[in-house]
């Protein structure tokens, strides 16, 4: 698996870099070693589709993505902290594959629970 990059998310050999995570345009770097799990979620009206940035649920933080309303799938990362990053890459399969490759995580988790 090679590196991945779209407008907001970049997967390198060391970490995931999420542009537009912090106000106003700060980048969050997530080392693969800090990722405990990745969960794929189907976006919907009450499941993050309309959330361009931020949260209405204090357990999840949606990185900036003005195109999120047109996307179908998001990824929730468990970093062992109270707040879980919620990402919507242009190619969620590629990002999930990169995470699983670099972390050694097992098969995909099921889509469950509310998001943002």
Image (tube, rainbow, N blue to C red):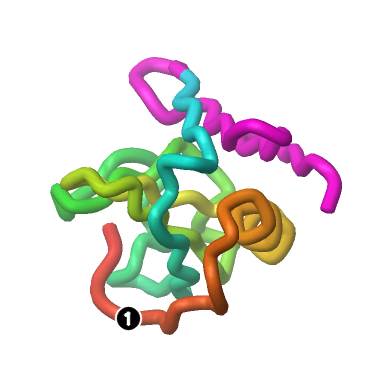
Q: Residue at x 61, y 60 (%)?
A: 100
Is 104 displayed left or right of 112 in the figure?
A: right
Which quadrant would residue 96 be assigned to in this image? bottom right
Residue at horizontal 59 percent and vertical 34 percent from the top: 15
Which residue is at the front of the view, 109 or 10? 109
Give how far across and how far down residue 76 sits, in percent. Answer: 41, 58
Q: Quadrant of the C terminus?
A: bottom left
Q: Name the image quarter holding residue 39.
A: bottom left
| Front in this rendered view, residue 30 or 28 | 30
Q: Position of residue 38 (x, y in %)?
A: 46, 62
Q: Is residue 63 above or below residue 71?
A: above
The answer to whether residue 67 is left or right of residue 41 is right
Picture quadrant of residue 16: top right
Q: 13 or 83, which is in the foreground?
A: 13
111 up-or-down from 37: above or below: below
> Residue 72's x, y, as percent?
56, 70
Q: Describe the element under mark 1 as helix, strand or loop.
A: loop
- Image position, residue 5 (x, y; %): 75, 38
Q: Is residue 89 visible?
A: no
Magenta region: 1-26
- 112 relative to 70 in the view: left or right: left
* Residue 48 painted magenta: no
Q: Residue at x 85, y 46 (%)?
A: 2
Residue drawn at point x = 42 percent, y = 61 percent: 37
Residue behind mark 1:
112
């Amino acid at each position: 698996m090679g590196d991945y990059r779209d407008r907001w998310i970049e997967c390198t050999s060391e970490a995931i870099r999420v542009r537009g995570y912090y106000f106003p345009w700060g980048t969050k770097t997530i080392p693969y070693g800090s990722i405990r799990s990745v969960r794929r979620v189907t976006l919907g009206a009450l499941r993050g589709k309309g959330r361009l940035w931020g949260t209405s649920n204090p357990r999840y933080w949606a990185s900036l993505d003005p195109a999120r309303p047109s996307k179908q799938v998001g990824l929730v990362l468990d970093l062992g902290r109270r707040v879980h990053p919620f990402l919507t890459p242009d190619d969620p399969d590629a990002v999930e594959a990169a995470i699983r490759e670099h972390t050694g995580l097992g098969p995909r988790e099921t889509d469950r629970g509310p998001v943002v």
